[in-house]
Image (tube, helix red, strand yellow):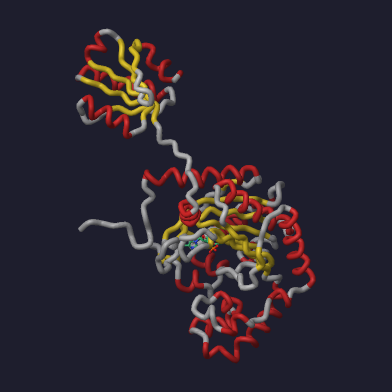
Amino acid sequence: MAYKAAKGTYDILPKDIDKWHFVEDVCKKICTSFNYQEIRTPIFESTNLFIRSVGETTDIVSKEMYTFDDKKGRSITLRPEGTAGVVRSYVEHKMFADSNQPTKLFYFGPIFRYERMQKGRQRQFTQFGIEALGSKDPAVDVEVISLVVEILQSLGLKKVKVALNTLGDSESRLKYREALVNHFKPVICDLCGDCKARLEKNPLRILDCKVDREHPAMKTAPKLMDYLNEESRKHFEKVKQYLTDLNIDFVIDNQLVRGLDYYNHTVFEVMSEVEGFGALTTLCGGGRYNGLVQEIGGPETPAVGVAFGVERLILALEAEGVNIPSNNKIDAYIVSLGEKANDFSVKLVNDLRRENLQVEKDYLNRKFKAQLKSADRLNARLAVIIGDDELEKDICIIKNLDTGIQEEVALDKVINYIKNK
Ligand code: HAM
């Protein structure tokens, strides 16, 4: 039987790796300039952590988690998102007590969700995320959004839209919840089974339903904006003002509620608007989560963050036709003819590599022409040709593969010659 990658997983092949390096390099560079530091947390955590943080009634927890018992019967889950693990680590390592606050972190890594597969949606995918913990200043919400915009710009993505909403604080939410229940109750028998279950447990999530999206009651649903208390309204006004000050374009989307329960105040997503991208256009999503640190055992700590789907960023780069810088040229290919020359080339490639040069040689005992073809395929700048005759005279022939010009070079000068080229 021939094995295939498990459904919803895929291999990132060497031919595609430049795109990944490009995205990773840009994200890391911009995080550094915004003073975010990298954190790496485990790929699995105790299941409870995700139930507590992401929320029991969310699709992620109720349908999509890869959960299993370990050999001691402890329930373990492959992380279905990155924030919970980072917050767990923040509390466990008492980062709130560090003198530098807010704590600003970023991460890259695999995420697992048992979802229906389609373009831009896998069961194992990669998130790049950032979390800023320890400040309730709306300027930090805007810092996170401006970091996102900076990344998109540096990647060369132009056709993007920032959608913004507020969920208010818990007091505002409670009032809004009541209004939603009253609004949907009379029509609940028309709505899908998930919505029926959400009515009492989590009515806000009805607004996010993919099945009943077109139902007239969705369009006339009360808007949270009308239920915000003074503090929540002020926070949102500041966010909008700072975004405007920074010339960051955004649209207000009252339907934007996000798929995880820990949010309050600002929530946002960035969508790709390029044609041919496919149905799943959300490149990243995030927001404020002021109650989460306390929820999982830490002190009361306001926080805000965002995560990108890296595969979707790469799809967007392809759809927008962005030129990805690639490093696919090697410095030299050693063409050796004859046993002695081959023996010599083993040492020569090693010496050249020690000088940090990118060098390859033939390992298949191929003929002269085939070795030159290999050099060409590898985009080598130079071919260093050594036959047993050349070896006798302590020389080699170096051919510039761009110009075709060749020169005789003394063997003891080869390293310097290639370095200078
Ligand atoms: P999320 O919206 O669930 O948020 O996921 C963030 C991003 O991950 C999405 O915008 C999308 O690009 C990508 N994504 C989600 N599911 C898939 C999938 N099945 N296949 C490919 N890409 C996918 C979070 O996870 C929050 N932890 C974000 C956050 C950080 N909020 C605060 N801090």
Residue 134 % position (x, y)? 70, 56
Residue 178, quarter of picture:
bottom right
User: Toward the viewer: 306 or 290?
Assistant: 306
- x and y percentages locating residue 322 in the rendered image: 49, 47
Q: Nearer the viewer, residue 302 or 114?
A: 114
Q: Position of residue 53 (x, y in %)?
A: 57, 67
* Residue shown at the point (44%, 20%) measured from the top left: 421
On the rendered image, what quadrant is the N terminus found in?
Answer: bottom left
- Compared with residue 63, is residue 284 higher up or lower down, i.e. above or below? above
Which residue is drawn at the image coordinates 60% and 86% (left, top)? 184
Residue under the point 37% across and 44% down: 15
| Residue 294 in sight here | no
Depth check: give the residue in front, 50 or 123.
Answer: 123
Question: Residue at point 49% right, 69% down?
Answer: 60
Q: Residue 248's quadrant in the figure?
A: bottom right
Visible residue check, residue 165: yes
> Height in image: 322 above or below 398?
below
Q: Report whether 97 appears left or right of 324.
A: right
Nearer to us in this view, 137 or 142: 142
- x and y, in percent, of residue 346 in the image: 29, 23
Side of 273 where 120 appears, left or right: left
Q: Quadrant of residue 185?
A: bottom right
